[in-house]
Amino acid sequence: MSGYHWGSLAVQERAGVRDLAEHVGRSIGADIREVAAAFLAQQPHLVVGASDGGGRLWASLLTGAPGFVRATGRRRIEVEGGLPEGDPLAGALATTGTAVGTLSLDPRTRRRMRLNGTLEATPDGFAVAAEQVFANCPKYLQKRRPLLRERTGSGVVSRGGVLTPGQARAVRAADTFFIATTAGRDGADASHRGGLPGFVEVHSPAELSWPDYPGNAMFMTLGNLVADPRAGLLFPDWESGAVLQLSGRARTEFGAGGERRVRFVVESAVQSLHPGRLLWSAPEYSPANPALPDHLGRTTR
């Protein structure tokens, strides 16, 4: 049992990687192994993807002292504390039964772990009953060191329907973002995308795109977009701790040579500078990052 739904299977077939995906998919399970539990307990942040209850999908970032996320059973994690005030998912993460995707990523070691399941509200935060648990390869992960936690912050800075010029510059400068997707009854997922600064192109205040680089052949994100075009993006500014959250719709374009590009239409944007945010060092870029094309001004790694 691979854990794939029909959307992922369709993309795997189109990409010609069905056999590889079936092999890789054997790593998907519902149990949280000891090594995974130990990894979670060391992390100071967690990405969560879900619907806000009003139909929009978002990716949000929770931070805390290591141990604020922990496995409390073979198929259960608990998260202490909630989202910062004003976060678009604050209401959803207080609602039992919400489908959520979580991603724990450690920039120090380039390791990551995904856990998808169903949320249960708790007095101190929330828990997730695990349905899918799996690790990913370190491709396109930039290495960073945590520096300090900033205790003060102004919270939500702006809300809008399109990117401001400053937000567009931040997106173009990004080397990492997170994406939340869903397949309805087949649950939600949170994943990572990385590359050299400039790999995300801004075509207008309401549209951006990025190349889909070769990965683990699962195509869980693109498969979800086949089933449901809603998506939420989270762009962290690692050095200032600011976050830019976008909600909208995405589609995948398949090129004749096997290339894939995802186009995203912005419907809502929230920019925040929350108290308690974690500040990180400048990146050590992944050696897997492809060179950018000439029109983006970079031809070398």
Image (cartoon, helix red, strand yellow):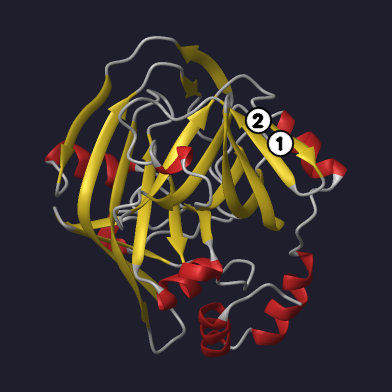
Q: How many numbered discs sit on the rendered protein?
A: 2
CB contact under 8 Å: marks 1 and 2 = yes
In this rendering, position of residue 200 left or right of residue 122: left
Residue 260 visible in image = yes
Q: Which residue shows up at 59% across the image and 37% down it?
A: 143
Instruction: Using the image as rendered, state which of residue 197 and residue 115 is in the foreground.
Output: 115
Which amino acid type corresponds to the residue marked 1 in the rendered image? Leu
Residue furthest right in the image: 34
| Residue that badge 2 annotates | 43
Instruction: Using the image as rendered, state which of residue 252 and residue 287 is in the foreground.
Output: 252
Q: CA distance from mark 1 to mark 2?
A: 6 Å
Q: Secondary structure at mark 2?
A: loop
* Image coordinates for residue 194, horizontal then vertical, percent: 48, 51
Q: Secondary structure at mark 1?
A: helix
Q: Residues within 10 Å of mark 2 (few under 14, many from 20)?
A: many
Could you say which disc has been placed on residue 176 in the image? none
In this rendering, position of residue 167 left or right of residue 142: left
Which amino acid type corresponds to the residue marked 2 in the rendered image? Gln
Q: Which residue shows up at 78% across the image and 71% down it?
A: 26
Image quarter in which the N terminus is found: bottom right
Q: Which residue shows up at 37% across the image and 23% down it?
A: 240
Residue furthest top in the image: 151
Q: Is residue 145 above or below residue 55?
A: above
Instruction: Using the image as rendered, state which of residue 204 and residue 82 is in the foreground.
Output: 82
Instruction: Using the image as rendered, state which of residue 276 and residue 119 is in the foreground.
Output: 119
| Residue that badge 1 annotates | 40
Q: Quadrant of residue 298?
A: bottom left
Q: Residues within 10 Å of mark 1 (few under 14, many from 20)?
A: many
Q: Is residue 39 above or below residue 33?
A: above
* Image coordinates for residue 32, horizontal then vertical, percent: 79, 48
Q: Which residue shows up at 14% across the image and 49% down it?
A: 162
